[in-house]
Image (spheres, grey):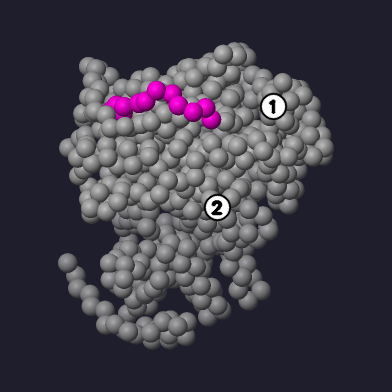
Amino acid sequence: MRLTNVTHLRLPFGRLWGYDVSVSALRGRLPVSFDQRLHVGAGDRRGSWMAMSFRLPSPTGREAIADAWLAVVGRHGTLRTAFVPGADGDPELHEIEIGPGTWVEHEVSPGQAVNEAVRDILDAACSPYQRPSHRLCVLETAAGITVVIAADHAHVDMWSMLVIARDLLSALDAGSDGRELLPEPAPAFVEHTQALLDRKPAPDHVRHRWEQIIGDSGGAMPQFPLPLGAPDPQRERVEVRDVFDLDDGAAFAAQARNDGVSTLALAVVAMTAVTRELAGTPLRAVFPVHSRFDDKWHDSVGWFITNSVLESAVAEPLAAAAAVKEAVQLGAWPLADVLAPWGGMPVAPGMFAISWLDLRRLPVRIDSVGLDAQYVSATIDTDGVMLWFILDDTGLHLRCRYPDTVEARISVGGWLDLLVARLQSDARSSVRGLLRVAGRTFRLERARRDDVKAIAALLSDDQFGPDRECAEFERYEAAYNLVVRDSSNYLGVVRNDSDCIVATMQLTVIPGLSRGGSSRLQIEGLRVAAAERSQGLGAAMLEWAHNFGRARGAQLAQVTTDEARERARAFYTRLGYRTAHVGLKRRI
């Protein structure tokens, strides 16, 4: 799922509506979590919210959307709570009742971008002391309806936004079928808050480790180790980068498995190495960890995040894995007690935080690609550096927010450049691309533009090559452009230990409705240089191709070969392929 900022959010022009719910007076008082107290205690302000936008898959009336939204609010207790300033200045949390309301059209002013109008609405509706501090908006366009749901961060986290989107879509489906909109209420976040408050205090070794890391950070939570300019809050600069596509993500994960660590740990290796190179210090950062320690909370909405600290001194997989494990353990204890010696969280300008969310491992999923779903952050002034990673079925994405100063652009921008380059290099050099054949090692990798001439030569060096291939190199370059634009294609080359291209193949994953909606892996243009044939390289390439297809949900692999290629047919038959169908071709 894409990570973006409301400033970068691209929305089509249309009629923008917001749903004004009815709200009761304050009711019973509820427990407040440590992070809620810190966040809400900073007061009403713009940009304290987080949001998700997505397109509805079919035409839907606003009243059906309103009914579905009320069902979502009714299922999740935190959406029926509100904060007020207490007599002692600390925020108090109270129950409220939410009822049906009315749709209000929000004007998009002349010259105003739609995302700017959305930002203004959410800034006003979703600040900490608003009642309620969440907002449902819909954008009606000729192309369909886009939904934007936002809430003050005190009530939600990224996981929660996914739950809200899933439940809204489920309620819409149920409503159209005449079924009950949503199942029974999910466990309320206030129950989780109370459970944490009732936990035993942290043991001495946890307190000592927190004291060490805060002491090494100058008596405050960890700060970004390079210059950021003026220490007071500045307008933010937000960078959004796609680090990996699906293929490089699979390669990076394969390397992590080979090293015996998680994908996160291997990413921490890269961040540690970059920090050591540029700043000469260990990697130290605030490290949010989720507190859904029991399955019962998986379908709940709330701020199920607690802050920990990550310290990684050695850019080595097992050391980084140990650092991540320690961070998770340090965050498993009530922070109010742990941080009491500092009077709460000791925050200083330049605080550095790293968030990691692997959507593939969550028990809550939506079709983020089909729905064009995006996590949306607000626009704020900041004096610190916040880095979010999202790993999903399309690859690895990051968003980084930092103060927009000359110094920070150089420091953080340079750190990000080096980090992305290191991560991409690690993916390209992953064990996933290694083919070991007859005591030799080859590397299979995605073809680059510079490889097109070598691929064309391999296609021509073939029994039928002189008749089928052409001498106009520009046509191969044009075909390469078409192939790489389609993410379902993988054009691969195999390099030997001298970095020479000795083989190629093109893989295409074809989704379909037949065979119960099975996807197929089509293998085309498999060619091996004459000097490397009959030694096992082709078989190793096919095994790699099968793993490639399985990772993308393909259940069937298919190849075509000319009837006159008797050796090729024998080769495929030996590897388990059967002549189950008759293929027909004609020129068009």
Whether residue 470 is visible here, answered yes or no, is yes
Mark 2, secondary structure of its residue: helix
| Boundaries of the magenta span | 18-30
Task: Mark 1 vs mark 2: give the one in front.
Answer: 2
- Mark 1 — residue? 221
| Quarter of the image with the C terminus in it | bottom left
Identified at 51% across, 49% down, the residue is 298
In front of the other: 48 or 399:
48
Relative image position of residue 391 (x, y in whole percent): 51, 47
Q: Distance between the residues labelled 1 and 2?
A: 30 Å
| Quarter of the image with the N terminus in it | top left
In front of the other: 193 or 222:
193
When asked about the image quadrant of residue 313, the answer is top right
Does 419 appear in magenta? no
Name the amino acid, label 1.
Met
Identified at 27% across, 40% down, the residue is 67
Left of 571 or right of it: where is 583? left
